[in-house]
Image (spheres, coloured by chain):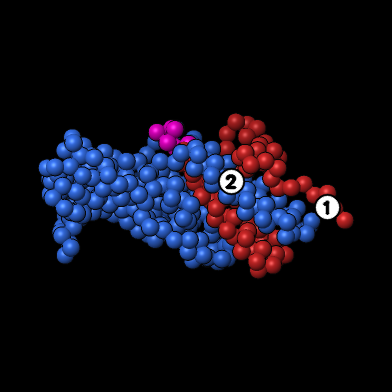
């Protein structure tokens, strides 16, 4: 039977940024126009809790794939951050 | 490490080394200068800046001048053991804000890139005007970098996510940073890599795990967006 699930990415053009804008937690965090350290901490805890939930449900191979994605996502974010700081320097 | 080679009649490595020593001293760096057995000139600068204290490390900026002939030199600018000296307990001021590690790591990378850029300016302004940059290439890299990183997601000591701490060891990061500047095309390329990896993974997952991981990626994107926003705010309000 064909799955009706929504693909993670539907376009090759900056889907991570699009995904960010669509997230309720992001909309909530920026609603007052500023991000507080407490909001960042809570979001980090939320991500860690989700990861701990999903980790045991992956095969070793899948976990390795996710691990690589995390590393490459970290590079992606660092690139974006660095470009932001270049623009602000 | 960044490496550039220059060629010009009248190129004087020793004068370049002296100029670098002078620049370090003028900017309050503890400075060392020595010649290796291979006759390479090595200039090192140390400084305990506030932002380095915040990051929990003291970087040793090293410039090595290799003499390749009477009119040709290769210069290497090294960041020292930037990541290796990372000490979570030393995060200091920023730890008061309880920000995850990538925030400060990216800030450190930015600071380092600014410093690298200034050093290259010093180098190139102290070469003969006829000097030509003949080669510009990053250090050889291997695909092994990602493979040698931890496969666990969490640091058992701190509970933090490992991936944020090792991004500077990734081949993709090193390649993009080889010239000290992140171009938009490099970000797009990295984005495409992430997309491809995600697409390769999702076809292997059942619907339930697919949905859970989709939530993880979404919330991770939010976390990263928050970190970037916080970084820009701090840099804007109180630049280092």
Task: Decide: is A87 above or below B71.
Answer: above
Residue depicted at 83% across the width and 52% down the height: A3
Check the residue under mark 2 and report the chain it is in: B
Q: Nearer the viewer, residue A79 or A9?
A: A9
Check the residue under mark 1 and report the chain it is in: A
Crowd rating for badge 2 (residues with CA inside 10 Å; few <14, some 14–19, many 20+): some
Residue depicted at 16% across the width and 53% down the height: B69
Image-quadrant location for residue B126: top left
Residue depicted at 37% across the width and 39% down the height: B240
Residue depicted at 26% across the width and 42% down the height: B133
Secondary structure mostly seen in magenta is helix
Q: CA distance from mark 2 to mark 1?
A: 25 Å
Q: Which residue is mark 1?
A: A3
**Is residue B86 visible to us here?**
no
Q: Is residue B157 magenta?
A: no
Crowd rating for badge 1 (residues with CA inside 10 Å; few <14, some 14–19, many 20+): few
Q: Nearer the viewer, residue B9 or A70?
A: B9
Q: Is residue A56 left or right of residue B87?
A: right
What is the secondary structure assignment of the residue under circle 1? loop
Q: Give the percent coordinates (x, y) of residue B125.
A: 21, 37
Give the residues drawn in magenta, as a range. A84-89
Q: Is residue B98 left or right of residue B222?
A: left
Q: Name the residue at the top extreme.
A: A33
Q: Give the percent coordinates (x, y) of residue B167.
A: 48, 54
Same chain for the residues under marks 2 and 1 in the image:
no
Marking on residue B102 = none
Q: Give the percent coordinates (x, y) of residue B24.
A: 21, 45
**Colour in which chain A is shown?**
red
Q: Which residue is mark 2?
A: B192
**Colour in which chain B is shown?**
blue
State yes or no: discs 2 and 1 in contact (Cβ < 8 Å).
no
């Amino acid at each position: 039977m064909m799955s009706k699930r929504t693909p993670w990415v539907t376009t090759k053009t900056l889907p991570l940024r699009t995904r960010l804008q669509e997230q309720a937690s992001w909309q909530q965090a920026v609603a007052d126009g500023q991000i507080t350290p407490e909001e960042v901490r809570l979001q980090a805890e939320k991500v860690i809790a989700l990861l701990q939930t999903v980790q045991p449900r992956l095969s070793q191979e899948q976990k390795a794939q996710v691990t690589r994605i995390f590393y490459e996502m970290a590079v992606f974010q660092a690139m974006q951050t660095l470009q932001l700081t270049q623009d602000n320097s | 490490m960044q490496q550039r080679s220059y060629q010009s009649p009248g190129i004087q490595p020793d004068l370049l080394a002296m100029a670098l020593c002078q620049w370090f001293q003028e900017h309050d760096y503890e400075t060392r200068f020595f010649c290796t057995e291979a006759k390479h000139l090595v200039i090192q600068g140390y400084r305990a800046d506030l932002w380095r204290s915040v990051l929990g490390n003291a970087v040793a900026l090293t410039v090595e001048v290799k003499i390749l002939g009477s009119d040709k030199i290769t210069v290497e600018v090294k960041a020292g053991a930037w990541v290796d000296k990372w000490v979570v307990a030393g995060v200091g001021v920023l730890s008061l804000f309880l920000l995850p590690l990538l925030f400060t790591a990216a800030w450190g990378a930015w600071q380092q890139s600014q410093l690298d850029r200034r050093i290259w300016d010093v180098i190139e302004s102290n070469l003969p005007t006829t000097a030509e940059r003949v080669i510009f290439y990053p250090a050889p890299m291997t695909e092994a970098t990602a493979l040698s990183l931890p496969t666990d997601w969490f640091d058992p000591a701190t509970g933090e996510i490992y991936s944020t701490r090792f991004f500077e060891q990734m081949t993709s990061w090193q390649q993009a940073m080889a010239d000290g500047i992140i171009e938009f095309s490099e970000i797009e390329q990295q984005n495409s890599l992430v997309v491809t990896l995600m697409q390769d993974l999702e076809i292997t997952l059942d619907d339930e795990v697919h949905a859970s991981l989709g939530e993880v990626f979404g919330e991770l994107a939010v976390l990263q967006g928050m970190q970037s926003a916080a970084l820009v705010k701090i840099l804007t309000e109180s630049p280092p």
